[in-house]
Image: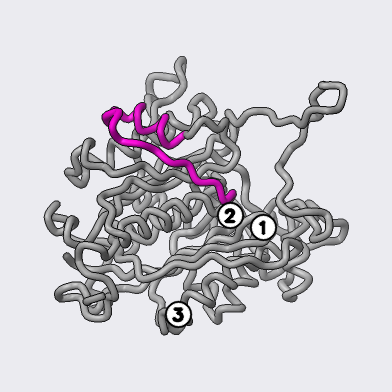
Amino acid sequence: MPSGAGLPGFRLSDDRQPVIIAALRTPVCRANGALKHLRSHELLAPVLTALLAETGVGAGDVADVVIGNAVGAGGNVARLAALEAGLPVTVPGLTVDRQCGSGLDAIVLASRLVAAGGGTYLAGGVESISTAPLRAHRNDDGEPAFFSRAQFAPPSHGDPDMGVAAENVAREYGISRARQDEFALRSHRRAVTAQASGTFARETVALPAASGTAPESPAVTADDGPRPKLSEALMARFPAAFVESGTVTAGNSCFDADGAAAVVITSLARARELGAADGLAVLGTDTAGVEPQLLGIGAAAAASRLLAAQSVDAADVDLVEFNEAFASQTLACLDHLGIDPLRANADGGALALGHAYGASGAVLVTRLLAQARRDPAAAPDGKLALAMISIAGGMGTAALFRHIRL
């Protein structure tokens, strides 16, 4: 197909080249904390409303709402949130479940719909772990047998818990406890700095506080995870959390969180009609499968194939966002790709902010757009940005973008 006008190297015509023109998120807060009173659709709806207001997209002009969710109550949270946000009943909704990758995969799906000739989409992810339903299998006698998580792989492949899998990755790829602790501490320090400087405030939609909250705190406006007092000494005191004598601890692992994030994605031609100043053009995406026992390496498999397909060297990527579920898997993936860990997650990641399962992949994209807009002149041809997330069951998704002026 012809390249986009004025954008050499783009493989799609202007009316099919996907571009993200806005991205917002809620505060990401610890599960059973500040956002525990809000169900998934109540977390997401304010983000959808804010995105429409920011971009000038008419509510009735949205072709579909595509949302990732991992442990919610079902019932198509995308449709429920769309209606909660006041979108007309003519706008449908589609919920995507690829577990931790759901939010990024929802954006990937929407980008492919644009490339196929679709219109304008709201896409992203949401998770309310606080309000997730209790889950149970039905025994032969009809009584419930409750379980804490779904099965991700058959016994023949192994189906380790996430922490055990993180230990597997640390052992397989030689990721030491010292490196994990160092990375996690840096994540907190970067997030603390970003929060103090107001960096996160520009991408965050405030949410209502629970009824009965003190008048001086009328809304939830900030992430509650970054720990300014965390130190090397404190990190060293955490014991192994999942495997005896292991290296993965509560300090170098993420915590469960509630939150939502979404983007407006449309064609380059439509973005110009809307008067958008800039955006993240989607260059390509990939999802790969790996051994479930080493599920944390899935993002590297996807990103390796994606970068090769796009003829891009990892060293040439300007911005990297990786979901920090565990420091061990983050470091293993970055090592595999040849990316210096210092270059990744400029403002910290899930180790400091928390992991809101279905939302986390969309948070990565929100962070990339915010970072790309800070100094657009730094890369005359537009900054290359890479989002990566590893996924339960032994998978990973990656997406490559270029920040462009419209």
Which residue position holds label 1?
Answer: 252
Residue 374 position (above or below residue 10): above
Q: Is residue 288 left or right of residue 212?
A: right
Dot 1: what SS? loop
Tag 3 near tag 2, CB within 8 Å: no
Instruction: Compute the Cα span from label 3 to label 1.
Output: 33 Å
157 or 244, which lies in front? 157
Confirm or deny contact between disc 2 and disc 1 (CB under 8 A). Answer: yes
Q: Position of residue 68 (x, y in %)?
A: 48, 45
Indicate which disc residue 159 carries: none
**287 to 159, vertically: above or below:** below
Q: Residues within 10 Å of mark 1 (few under 14, many from 20)?
A: many
Please state the horizontal and vertical placement of residue 4, each as a whole percent of the image: 20, 72
Q: Position of residue 393 (x, y in %)?
A: 68, 56
Give the residue number, with chain letter if any, for mark 3. 309
Q: Amino acid at mark 1?
A: Asn
Q: Residues within 10 Å of mark 2 (few under 14, many from 20)?
A: many
